[in-house]
Image (cartoon, rainbow, N blue to C red):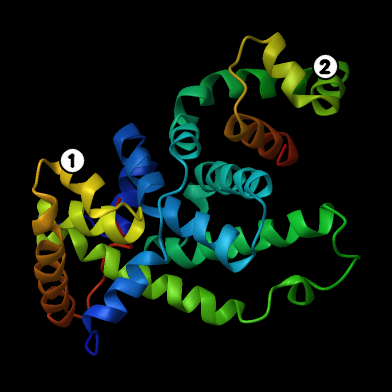
Amino acid sequence: MTMQTDSELVARCRDGEEAAWNELVERFSRYVYAIAVQAFRLSAHDAEDVFQEVFARVYEHLGRLRNDDAIRPWIAQLTRRLCIDRIRSSGREGPADMDDLEPGGYDESLAQLDEAMTVRASLDAVGEDCREILDRFFCRDESYRVIGDALSLPAGTIASRISRCLAKLKVQLEGRSGGPAPSGVR
Amino acid sequence: MTGYDEERIAELLRLLPPAPTGWVQAAQELPAARTEIAALVARAEADAAFRARVVADLEAALVAEGIPVTPSVVAVLRSSLETD
């Protein structure tokens, strides 16, 4: 299965395809959420407001994006700015430069999230079964038992399946070309 | 891209837990609300008093127009009014 690149997805959104917009939100929802909650440590309430505001602005201004392949850095920058606005308006910090309100190590956190998005983009290539099991275990923090029940698999086989799927994903990542790649998957 | 071991891959996967389902759904429903929001914004552009009421309380304005109030809809309305 080949995922669409970010620019292909953006083009479909611009054409008004509702399914493409749903996919774009799916593709970047974890990224925006992680920036707000992990990098900026916003409360759930503030993070939700920022999350919705980010996608509202993306929706409104998608037509102005000059380089469709640059949607991920654009979304990152938008999220960063809105997180800083939220911190400033909450009164936790006085007036200051944007850079002063950015948490320490932000650039490193963002780089890690970008790398994580690259790994997620490879998940589809390892097959639905592996994608599902790796997502449930590592991203959703589900136990072997919960995964086994959900996927109708013996709980005793989950660990070995995870190990095999990780090895498969590693091979996939090592074989990636340097061309444009999608930003992530569900 | 090289240099990934399984431990590193697992660590990176853990960095991206899913956003709450309701948040994602609300963001996905934006296009459906677009037409209604556009009509409200057009009315606000034509009627300064109405615009003042909308700006003063976005949520109340949406309720009055029968538009479902979600954080994303409010955000789009706010953004649309700001860019007028």
Foreground: B7 or A39?
B7
- Outermost residue on the right side: it is A94
Q: Please give left or right for residue A20 compared with residue A63 in the image.
A: left
Relative image position of residue A103 (x, y in whole percent): 69, 74
- Residue type at mark 2 is Phe
Q: Is residue A65 visible?
A: no
Name the residue beneath numbered marker 1: A149
- What's the mark number on residue B14? none
At x 67% / y 19%, what residue is drawn? B40
- Residue at image location 44% in from the left, 50% down from the top: A29
Which of B70/B39 is in front? B70
Label 1 secondary element: helix
Could you tell me residue B61's position as x and y percent?
74, 17
Amino acid type at mark 1: Asp
Residue hosting label 2: B50
Seen at 27% across and 80% down, the residue is: B7
Percent position (x, y) of residue A169? 16, 71
Badge 2 crowding class, 10 Å Cα cut-off, few under 14, some 14 to 19, many 20 or more, is some
Residue mark closest to the camera, 2 vs 1: 1
For this view, does A160 lie left or right of residue B64? left
Q: Residues within 10 Å of mark 1 (few under 14, many from 20)?
A: few
Q: Is residue A95 visible?
A: yes
Residue at disc 2, secondary structure? helix
Q: Quadrant of residue B67?
A: top right
Q: Residue at x 15, y 64 (%)?
A: A159
- Residue B26 is left or right of residue B53, and the answer is left
Chain identifier of the residue bearing label 2 in the image: B
Q: Is A92 drawn above or below residue A129 in the view shown?
A: below
Q: Are marks 2 and 1 on the same chain?
A: no
